[in-house]
Amino acid sequence: MKNILLSLALTLALMPSDGYAKPAPPKQRVELKHGSHRTGMRTDADMQQWRDSGLGQFIHWGVYAVPGGHWNGKVFGGAGEWIRVWNEIPHDVYDNFYKQFNPTEFDAAKWAKLAKEMGVKYMIFTTKHHDGFCMWPSKYTDYTIANSPYKKDIVKELVDAYTKEGIDVHLYFSIIDWNHKGYMSGTPKTPEQKAAYEEFKKFTRNQLFELLEKYPETKGLWFDGSWDASWKSEYAWVDQLGQDLRKAKPGLIIGSRFRADENGKRHYDTNGDLIDDYDQTWERDLPETYDQVKGVDWDCCMTVPENGWGYHATWLTYAKNSYDLIDMIMHANSMDGNFVLNFGPDAKGNIRPEETKLAKEIGAWMKVNGEAVYGAHHANLKPQGWGYYTQKEGKTYLSVFNRPIDNRVKVVLPGSKGAPEKAYLLDGKTPLEILPGGKNKRNENIYYIAIPQDYKTDKPFVIVLEGEIKGSNKGKYQQALT
Ligand code: JFZ
């Protein structure tokens, strides 16, 4: 127990400490060379496709799947992919796990089919996590899949299989690399350290271009580990690297966890403007109110257990069920974010049964109700206790998680304009009655949508309202451009 606590403390100590609080913009804007390079959201087709995705899949897979959170009869209390920091396990033991990494049951097509069934539009794959092990045969290091008994290029297998299913692929890449001699988390001080870190920078840059070259289908890079003081102090070089990557791959999508500005500010620069294309700070967390979303694109990546991304044979905490996750999908989408669910396959190459079950259950729900997710965005209507609004093209979606006891779903619409013309359930397209509810003191119009008493379901369900309903987010992106 003491060891578990110790390693937990260690894990936390190694994690970013600058928190996720969005800075209040300064009263006076300052001139920045390496802050945000764009005002407002990206409006190009690649970004629009990402924005309309709604649901994504994260896959954390690497040699940490070999111990799977266990070593020497003891259980690691932290995230499976962080087991190398555990005192119980010597580094040289961990660094030799790749010799046992032979996922003979891995079938990329099977994973991609499951993802398709779940209804995800894109997938993020860990090409290299903090341990430095490359899931592709990088020519810049020997610590790669090519030197494992498996030998084959896992990144390629996945890129091909997912692309075939029409699912976009984004590549996760850790700036932290515990395997590279020149890597350090603090700023290099001595000439030797500086020279070593220069080597590491070159190596990192080479690997990134290698990935884009080898996997031209790549839609985006999902960076991680950029909280290191060393990386932050290289803000000018990192900024240039980002621009060069974008040049090499027009349309490339990069989130806010890549670089800092010249004052060490991450995610949002000194002026409070988002750095790069979308806000990556909603990790295992969702905004409580829409105000917390700073008018930017964002994603929420989520683990099934409380924490832990890579395979851990023993989940020690509560594991979310599909109801919890569907709630989060709608929560994120109602606030303009993409929801990305993590999977941690085992060392044989199998997606664990718990996760397979969740993917299928989510998929079954998305099949009926996906219209409320794909291409649907924030509706700018007052949230009600029954659930979440999303909206697109003259349709407003009410995802009902808490069915009112009187079977009337309340809708409060501002102003005089915007009455719902038609209502129906996405489930079976059952038409629903719209009952007038008068006006409140704020002069808002109230409607009740009647759910038939005999409509039985044990799942959340979606009501569609047709009609031009005020609160539509049309024009919002345009506004953001100013
Ligand atoms: C990082 C990794 O350390 C982790 O293993 C996983 O890959 C996850 C997706 O990303 O974990 C983080 C990163 C940032 C914070 C917390 C966990 N943070 O800033 O709070």
Image (cartoon, rainbow, N blue to C red):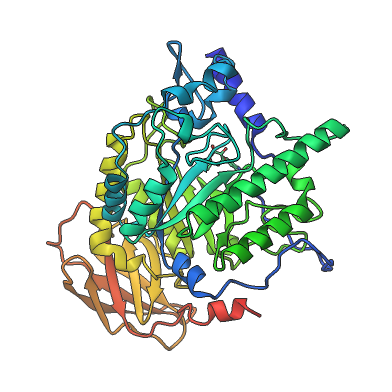
Side of 96 relative to 123 (left or right): right
| Residue found at x 39% / y 60% | 385
The quadrant in which residue 194 appears is: top right
Of residue 211 and residue 348, the one placed in the foreground of this image is 211
Residue 19 appears in the picture as rendered = no
Residue 294 appears in the picture as rendered = yes
Residue furthest front as drawn: 139
Q: Position of residue 75 (x, y in %)?
A: 45, 18
Q: How many marks?
A: 0
Q: Position of residue 36 (x, y in %)?
A: 71, 64
In the picture shown, does residue 19 fall above or below 9?
below
| Residue found at x 32% / y 56% | 401
Q: Position of residue 134 (x, y in %)?
A: 52, 38
| Residue found at x 65% / y 45% | 204
Residue furthest bottom as drawn: 417
The quadrant in which residue 331 appears is: bottom left
Side of 353 relative to 27 (left or right): left
Side of 203 relative to 221 (left or right): right
Of residue 226 and residue 26, the one placed in the foreground of this image is 226
Which quarter of the rendered picture does the C terminus lie within? bottom right
Q: Position of residue 288 (x, y in %)?
A: 52, 55
Residue furthest top as drawn: 72
The quadrant in which residue 111 appears is: top left
Of residue 406 and residue 389, the one placed in the foreground of this image is 389
Side of 179 relative to 123 (left or right): right
| Residue found at x 76% / y 53% | 237
In the picture shown, does residue 243 fall above or below 439?
above
Q: Quadrant of ligand 1?
A: top right
